[in-house]
Amino acid sequence: MNILTANTVTTVEFSSKLEEINVKYKKEKEDLKKIIAETARSQAEQILADDNDDSMGNPEELCKKLAELRLQYNSIIVKQKEEFNSTMKEYTDKIMTNMGKWQLIKTRPNSNITSDDIPLCFICHKAPSICSGGSACRVFQESEKKDKALQDLAIKILNSYEDDKRTAIRMIFSKVRIKKPDREKQRHNQIMQCLENTCKTYHIVRRAPLRDEKALVMKMYDCIKYKMVY
């Protein structure tokens, strides 16, 4: 199986998994929607029927129930995101595995190990024992790890502040066309300022040191732009 065929098979497999996730959580949202509608209706009837001078017009019970339903909704969203991100990571790992295994070699003459057994180095495409990349390969791998860690942190920060995230999403994907370059630059600066404030708030609340702020803010921007968060 060549690399294109392997990746196509993998993509079809994981597309099906992602669709199953969407269907699963869509059903949960639809069920919750019915509960919210019924709760709002019954609470509205109780409020309208309340003629007691002391409690008339008090929305406390309604707000309490809506807050509980809000928690249920947030729980569904978090679970869906976690399952989606986990599946996408599994998909990426599988694609990278395909990339590393599509070329294979014999390690030594007269060996029982065939070319179908040993994967090549992802960087130099040679067996690990004779990898020509050396430190370059290790540097690449370390760079990949750091980038992945930065991306995970960016997603975590964005998901910690739903209002800020949605504001940034609206600004980035605004359909309003700005003809003047200076206005477009101004909007971009506003987006970056919004993300920068969110980033600082996250670290201040947790009393955590903020490193590589510019890189982290840019990664937050990319996560929204490429729809890694929603």
Image: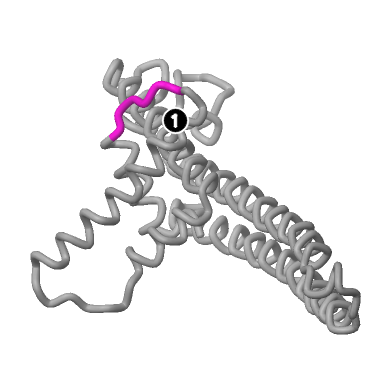
**Amino acid identity at mark 1:** His
x 45%, y 21%: residue: 107
Residue toward you, 22 or 57: 57
> From the viewer's perspective, is 148 left or right of 58?
left
Q: Position of residue 97 (x, y in %)?
A: 50, 40
For disc 1, the neighbor class at 10 Å (few under 14, some 14 to 19, many from 20) is some
Q: Is residue 21 magenta?
A: no
x 56%, y 25%: residue: 113
x 9%, y 68%: residue: 181
- State the residue lying farthest toward the front: 53
Residue toward you, 202 or 63: 63
Q: Identify the residue position indicated by label 1 in the image.
A: 203
Is residue 35 placed above or below 194 in the rendered structure?
A: below
Q: Position of residue 20 (x, y in %)?
A: 70, 65
> From the viewer's perspective, is 75 left or right of 5?
right
Residue toward you, 64 or 142: 64
Q: Which residues are magenta?
A: 208-213
Q: Is residue 209 magenta?
A: yes
Q: Position of residue 212 (x, y in %)?
A: 30, 29
Is residue 145 placed above or below 176 in the rendered structure?
A: above
x 44%, y 59%: residue: 227
> From the viewer's perspective, is 60 left or right of 93?
right
Is residue 149 placed above or below 130 in the rendered structure?
A: below
Is residue 175 placed above or below 219 in the rendered structure?
A: below
Element class at badge 1: helix
